[in-house]
Amino acid sequence: MTPRILVTTTSFQDTPGDHHTKLAATGWDIVTARGPLSEADTLALVGEIDGYICGDDAITRTVLEKARPRLKVLSKYGIGVDKIDVKACTEFGIPLLFTPGVNHTTVAEHAFLLLLALEKNLLFHTDSTRAGGWKRQTGHELLGKTIGIVGMGRIGKEVAIRAKAFGMQPLGYDVYWDEAFATEHGIPRAASLDELFGQADYISLHTNLTSETRDLVCAKTIAKMKPGVIILNCARGEIVNTADIAAALASGHVLGYGTDVLDEEPPRADHPLLHLPNCVVTPHIGSRTHESVQRQAMAAVTNLINAMHGEKPLAQVNPEVPVSNHLK
């Protein structure tokens, strides 16, 4: 029987590149859907698929129970697996693959897009000129400002390097600290998140979503931040409490919030962050460049093909689950 593969990530589908050729060359039956999918939508598609290249679909235990035993490989396009029940994947013997190290440059660039848009009042000025006006507001320089980076993994490191190029002072915080990198680039380590929150003019979030980081930015922690702080989020929407950040933006304690992610994607029309003048929201496209998409997509396809042939994938979330040759 010809293997049946489900592909749901839209950037994979919409961006041309060799990943399409490589997947098509398998001769497998390719089924596509437009993600990210809800649990109900995902449930409707699984059960008769052998491999799955997913984006940020809700892949719950219920979904995996229906998908087994036919689902042999789950290949995540990207690095965040917070929407996937990793424990259930492991319990059911489904290798969960992912693609670290492919989008850090693009996401770091996007963080500065959001920051510059806020500090230079970009949306106000473009809206004014497009409407036939010539209204102007005075912005701020980045030079000399302190940017607190929460999460000093690949993306956080790239943000720090770019911050130095702007003449800024990065201040990092991470439980796992790369001392060699920090020494090379002159990046001090905050002793605690409270220290970082109290010193930073800008705060850029680059940490995973876990039970510890959910609502990390909330009324309690915002109160510890400098008045006029700008917060950037290219990680996960749930790291920032929506109601609390909206209130802080309205009060002016937080001068601006630039985010590529929301707690609800896509958001409802009356989402509280969509219509605030000091909030810039982009639709989770921080890693969507041709270069990054092609790297992620090729890695996701390579992972899938290798695992289906019983060969070692590039990266696996649950390496204790062995891959088996399902094409014999």
Image: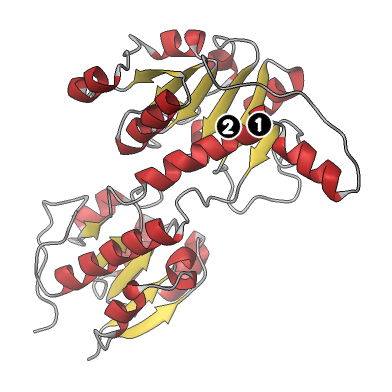
| Placement of 12 over or under 190, stated as above or below | below
Q: Is residue 236 visible?
A: no
Q: Which of 216 and 306 is in front in this view?
A: 306
Q: Which quadrant of the structure image shows residue 162?
A: top left
Colouring: secondary structure
Classify mark 2: helix, strand or loop. helix
**Disc number at residue 118?**
1
Q: Which amino acid, mark 2?
A: Leu
Q: Which of 47 and 133 is in front in this view?
A: 133
Q: Which amino acid, mark 1?
A: Leu
Q: Number of numbered discs present?
A: 2
Q: Quadrant of the N terminus?
A: bottom left
Q: Nearer the viewer, residue 294 or 245?
A: 294
How far across and down, in percent of the image, does residue 219 sit?
60, 18
The residue where tag 2 is placed is 115
Q: In which quarter of the image is the C terminus?
A: bottom left
| Placement of 185 over or under 305, stated as above or below | above
The 10 Å Cα crowd at callout 2, few under 14, some 14 to 19, many 20 or more, is many
| Placement of 104 over or under 149, stated as above or below | below
**Disc number at residue 161?**
none
How far across and down, in percent of the image, does residue 263 sit?
56, 42
How far across and down, in percent of the image, does residue 235 sit?
45, 39
Residue in view at x 52 percent, y 15 percent: 145
Q: Nearer the viewer, residue 60 or 314?
A: 314
